[in-house]
């Protein structure tokens, strides 16, 4: 094959693959009805992922998210306010993917994911000292032990504990 | 090499520091006649310990004493990309984003909104970092 032909074929295949992937994601998003987002929401990542990990929406129930989203100017001591279109857009995202509409295990009266029953259960083998470890600093710092947190990966098999931290036995 | 050129259209080209300089011109105009941006005033402002917030007394609390390097959020520990345009070409390229962060961070660190003159000085300081 001539170089020009090879280049043309390569070019076409790159664009076709990209298009198929994009369409696939859109269609899957539209029909799956999954509670776990299949893609990372770009605005969620930039607006909520600058100061802390962009927490997956299923980590809190909808009433908790709603309360949080209506007090962003006083967000755990920080001003995290958004303009109204951005706030509405993110609320719609949360309405779709939140951890239920008031299911108990995903509820947090103080709006902290760390206060939910599911979080406490999932971390019951973590010793108290781990949260104060210099490289952890805060329970909000998911990526300290979940290296894939930024990409939404919190799987136990991918845990990497900072040096000196050991899980407690059951 | 030719193959690499083919996929260029799907890779966004990095922006230069020009938008940041344009933004500085706009802040200077907004600050009014007689104002001339000063990197030195901006440097002092950047390092000043306002002390309004215990966790974040200064800009440098999160963006560090070297804004050309990586920062770290003072509360959550999350890494923050460099603030100086020379180290991070995305900085100060979109005025809505820049205004949002000045609005939030000035309120939190300085305890009030920053003036156009203060923003201009800080930007002049950040642009002076090579």
Image: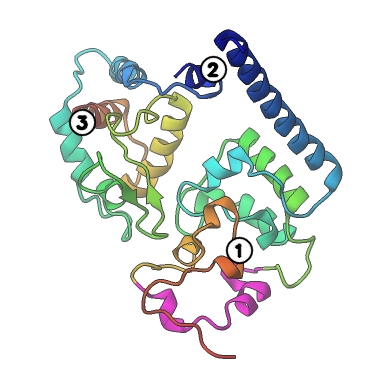
Q: Which residue is mark 1?
A: A111
| Residue A111 lies in the magenta stretch | yes
Above or below residue B108? Residue A163 is below
- Nearer to us of marks 2 and 1 is 2
Q: Chain of mark 1?
A: A
Q: Is residue A127 left or right of residue A36?
A: left
Magenta residues (range): A108-133
> For the residue carrying disc 2, how many other residues have a C-alpha within 10 Å: few (<14), some (14-19), or many (20+)?
some
- Nearer to us of marks 2 and 3 is 2
> For the residue carrying disc 3, how many other residues have a C-alpha within 10 Å: few (<14), some (14-19), or many (20+)?
many
Residue most extreme to the left: B40
Distance from disc 1 to disc 3, alpha carbons, whole Å, reads 38 Å
Name the residue located 56 percent from the left edge and 23 percent from the top edge.
B10
Distance from disc 2 to disc 3, alpha carbons, whole Å, reads 39 Å
**Residue A90 locus on image (x, y percent):** 66, 43
Same chain for marks 2 and 1?
no
Q: Which residue is mark 2?
A: B6
Disc 2 to disc 1: CB gap under 8 Å:
no
Distance from disc 2 to disc 1, alpha carbons, whole Å, reads 48 Å
**Residue B45 locus on image (x, y percent):** 21, 39
Q: Say what secondary structure mark 2 lies in.
A: helix
Above or below residue A128? Residue A58 is above
Residue most extreme to the front: A1
- Nearer to us of marks 1 and 3 is 3
Residue nearer the viewer, B83 or A68: B83
Q: Which residue is mark 3?
A: B125
Q: Chain of mark 2?
A: B
């Amino acid at each position: 094959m001539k170089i020009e032909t090879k280049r043309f074929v390569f070019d076409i295949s790159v664009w076709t693959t990209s298009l198929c992937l994009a369409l696939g994601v859109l269609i899957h998003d539209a029909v799956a009805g999954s509670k776990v987002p299949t893609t990372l929401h770009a605005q969620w990542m930039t607006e909520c992922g600058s100061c802390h990990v962009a927490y997956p929406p299923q980590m809190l129930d909808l009433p908790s998210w709603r309360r949080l989203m209506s007090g962003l100017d006083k967000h755990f001591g920080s001003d995290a306010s958004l303009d109204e279109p951005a706030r509405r857009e993110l609320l719609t995202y949360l309405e779709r993917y939140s951890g239920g509409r008031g299911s108990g295990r995903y509820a947090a009266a103080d709006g902290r994911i760390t206060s939910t029953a599911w979080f406490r259960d999932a971390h019951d083998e973590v010793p108290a000292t781990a949260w104060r470890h210099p490289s952890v600093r805060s329970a909000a710092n998911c990526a300290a032990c979940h290296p894939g947190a930024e990409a939404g990966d919190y799987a136990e098999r991918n845990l990497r504990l900072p040096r000196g931290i050991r899980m407690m036995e059951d | 090499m030719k193959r690499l050129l083919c996929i260029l259209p799907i890779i966004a080209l990095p922006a230069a520091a020009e938008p940041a300089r344009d933004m500085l011109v706009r802040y200077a105009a907004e600050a009014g006649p007689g104002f001339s941006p000063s990197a030195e005033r901006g440097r002092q402002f950047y390092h000043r310990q306002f002390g309004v917030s215990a966790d974040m007394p200064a800009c440098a609390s999160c963006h560090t004493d070297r804004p050309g390097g990586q920062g770290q959020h003072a509360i959550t520990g999350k890494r923050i990309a460099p603030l100086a345009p020379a180290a991070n070409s995305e900085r100060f390229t979109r005025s809505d984003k820049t205004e949002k962060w000045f609005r939030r961070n000035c309120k939190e660190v300085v305890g009030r909104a920053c003036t156009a003159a203060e923003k201009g000085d800080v930007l002049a300081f950040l642009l002076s970092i090579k």
